[in-house]
Amino acid sequence: MTDETDNRPPLLVLVGPTAVGKTALSLQIAKSLNAEIISGDSMQVYRRMDIGTAKLMQEDREGVPHHLIDICEPEHPFSVSEFQSVCTQKIQEIHNRGRLPFIVGGTGLYVESVCYGFQFQDIGASEPFRAEMRAYALEQGPQALHDRLFAIDPVAAAKIHYNDEGRVIRALEVYHLTGKPLSSLQEQSRGDDKTSPYRLCIIGLTMDRADLYRRIEERVDHMLANGLVEEVSSLLKQGVPRDAVSMRGLGYKEIAAYLAGETDYDSAVEVLKRDTRHFAKRQLSWFRHMKALEWVDIGGETKNSELFAKICAIIAGKFPLDLEYICS
């Protein structure tokens, strides 16, 4: 039931693990609801990183405006606080045009930071500490570095894969600079649904785990067939460093290791598929803790028309009727 006394602007959000089918469904929803899509993906902000991020090209967007795609260079360490700032501004612009802001993506922290107005502290950085940690990881291995994080912040360690060296080092750096675990600082930054600046409708897509993993493997094969190796090679030749935040993303770090001769092609592909499955599990774990999220199972024999009708019913229950958004 909607509350017509709530004057906060509406914000529609669609989340789900990688390869679950958010993109196709988001276009159908956006066209029916006069919406503009805002990418909630931490990697699609980077220019020239198209294949590995499963970026929807302009010609495939079916006339639906898309935002926060191709907004910075791969060398730039785009952060969640930057995303929150730019996304918040974009939501207001879309609302001012009389259209529905619609976030679609799988980066849980990015999406949640906007939905609930997280307050981020300017913690700063320590390059000497980062260099020390990189040297430690090189000498002792990524698991040993992750073990150091687990000893001081098991909550953060549980959410960060041991191979995600950049995020592990950042979590250690936060503790080094503040004396407080990253997880506790993140918890302090969280708002709740009562303080959200928006009238939220958050829909999460899910499906049978075996079907999801099959789709993940097919997506990786499709990326490779469409030139992922060439894309990574081109970025490296253009001078994008391997330790850049962008190049530590799934698909990029594994193929970069292959191109550097650190592993063979088949092993790199196997690791990429495995790590993408692990990433999907972490995404689902994050989304399960998001407040007010409505799950929709899109697997099985459910017809598209039935699925769409179910989603429209969820939206109608969240937004006031006078918005005149129409599902048809």
Image (cartoon, rainbow, N blue to C red):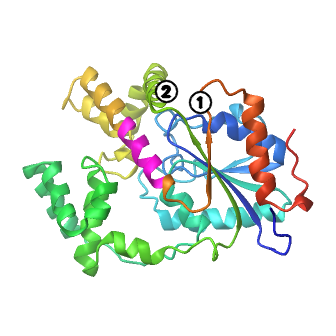
Q: Is residue 170 visible?
A: no
Q: Nearer the viewer, residue 178 or 61?
A: 178
Q: Relative to 251, is 85 on the left or the right? A: right
Kindly state the secondary structure of the residue where label 2 is placed. helix
Mark 1 residue type: Gly
Q: What quarter of the picture does the C terminus occupy?
A: top right
**Quarter-of-image position of residue 22:** top right
As drawn, 328 above or below 261: below
Q: Nearer the viewer, residue 224 or 30?
A: 30
Q: Relative to 166, is 323 on the left or the right? A: right
Q: Is residue 116 visible?
A: yes
Residue pointed to by mark 1: 299
As drawn, 42 above or below 213: below
Q: What quarter of the picture does the N terminus occupy?
A: bottom right
Kindly state the secondary structure of the residue where label 1 is placed. loop
- Residue name at image x 77 percent, y 68 percent: 9
The reply to whether the C-beta atoms of the residues labelled 2 and 1 are less than 8 Å apart is yes
- Residue name at image x 36 percent, y 30 percent: 273
Mark 2 residue type: Asp
Type of secondary structure dominating the magenta stretch: helix
Q: Earlier in the sequence, mark 2 or mark 1?
A: 2
Residue 145, position in %: x, y?
A: 16, 56
- Mark 2 and mark 1: span between their CA atoms? 8 Å
Residue pointed to by mark 2: 211
In magenta, the rendered stretch is 276-286
